[in-house]
Image: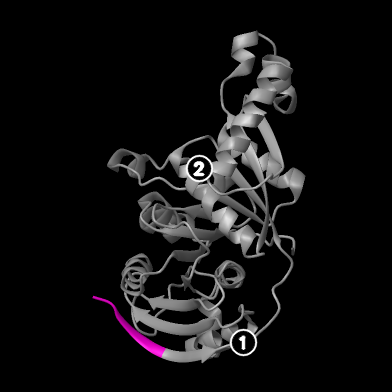
């Protein structure tokens, strides 16, 4: 059983919003994709993101035509102008039905959704990707072949995977903090997506009191500086929107369990985590907190990558 201790509580002063995040929204016409569009539209209306859409038809065009096609040209080469216009119109209709505007649209064919998204992220220099998240059945959770996680693995950009129940700017985000650079970037990105007047909770979970896991990046920092001092330092480095509220919590228990329990108790909209580096044996035995949350599919999850991303 986890026990949380409240160690800090502060309402930050009003600060101007940073530049809108260049955001790519992946859509395939599914209900999950519509959820992602709705959240992107809400974030755009709040002045937080500048969205573009990528629509993907993963049909294997090379096999159908017998000719190897450049994926960037495959749609036009196979479908022709009239079909392309009809497809683009259908995507625009989907965007508007979910509250989106006249966003730029890129049509991709002949590649998987993760490949298409990764190429668009690189081409557009995106700051954020938004995808719909499906609640996975047992087999999908075991095999871990869901599209959202494959996108997270392939792009070096923060990804917001939207689960059922989220259709607005997040009002409460719980951030898992292990003092790795990825988790601290998760906290800063979460603050940029938070609703005015919302709450950002920074949560550090220890499997055993005073004994951080040695394979994690933040281990030496915790030993050298102390957990409370690091939480307070990170809190001062985060820019919050007008009227937003920040709190820090420490908990004892397995990080994945603590995050789930805390998000449920606080009725959080999103759980934000960084993709932590683990030694190969530890990763095989324990898995990844970010992967477990995405495969679970019950919470919207913001995942930041291991590598640095260009500033907005």
Q: Main secondary structure of the magenta part?
A: strand
Give the CA separation, mark 1 to mark 2.
Answer: 36 Å
The picture places residue 232, in percent across and down from the top left corner, at 55, 89
The picture places residue 40, in percent across and down from the top left corner, at 58, 54
Q: Up-down: is 286 above or below 6?
A: above
Q: Is residue 9 magenta?
A: no
Q: How many numbered dots are placed on residues in this image? A: 2
Of residue 289 and residue 249, the one placed in the foreground of this image is: 249
Left or right of residue 298, residue 124 in this image: right
The picture places residue 135, in percent across and down from the top left corner, at 36, 47
Report the span colored magenta.
Answer: 1-6
Q: Give the labeled residue for mark 1.
A: 236
Residue 308 figure quarter: bottom right
Q: Is residue 2 magenta?
A: yes
Which residue extends farthest left?
1
Dot placed on the residue nearer the N-terminal end, 1 or 2 = 2
Left or right of residue 263, residue 301 in this image: right
**Is residue 68 among the parts visible in the rendering?**
no
Give the residue drawn at x 44%, y 40%: 31
Q: Give the labeled residue for mark 2.
A: 33
Give the residue drawn at x 55%, y 86%: 230
Give the residue drawn at x 49%, y 74%: 178
């Amino acid at each position: 059983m986890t026990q949380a201790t409240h160690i800090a509580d502060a309402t930050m002063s009003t600060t101007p919003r940073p530049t809108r995040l260049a955001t790519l929204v992946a859509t395939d016409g599914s209900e999950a994709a519509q959820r992602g569009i709705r959240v992107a539209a809400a974030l755009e209306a709040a002045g937080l993101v500048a969205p573009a859409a990528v629509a993907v038809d993963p049909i294997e065009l090379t096999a159908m035509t017998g000719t190897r096609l450049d994926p960037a040209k495959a749609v036009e080469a196979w479908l022709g102008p009239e079909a392309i216009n009809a497809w683009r119109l259908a995507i625009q209709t989907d965007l508007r039905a979910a509250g989106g505007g006249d966003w730029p649209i890129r049509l991709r064919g002949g590649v998987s959704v993760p490949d298409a998204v990764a190429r668009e992220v690189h081409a557009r220099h995106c700051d954020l990707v938004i995808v719909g998240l499906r609640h996975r059945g047992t087999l999908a959770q075991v095999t871990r072949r869901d599209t959202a996680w494959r996108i997270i693995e392939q792009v070096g950009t923060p990804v917001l995977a939207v689960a059922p129940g989220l259709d607005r700017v997040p009002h409460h985000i719980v951030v898992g903090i292990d003092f790795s650079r990825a988790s601290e970037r998760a906290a800063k990105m979460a603050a940029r997506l938070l609703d005015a007047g919302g709450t950002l909770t920074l949560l550090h979970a220890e499997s055993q009191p005073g004994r951080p896991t040695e394979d994690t990046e933040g281990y030496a920092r915790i030993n050298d500086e102390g957990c409370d001092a690091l939480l307070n330092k990170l809190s001062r480095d985060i820019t919050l929107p007008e009227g937003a509220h920040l709190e820090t919590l420490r908990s004892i228990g397995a990080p994945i369990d603590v995050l789930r329990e805390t998000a449920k108790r606080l009725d959080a909209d999103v759980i934000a985590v960084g993709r932590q580096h683990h030694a190969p044996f530890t990763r095989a035995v324990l898995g990844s907190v970010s992967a477990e949350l995405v495969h679970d599919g019950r919470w919207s999850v913001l995942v930041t990558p291991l590598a640095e991303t260009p500033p907005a």
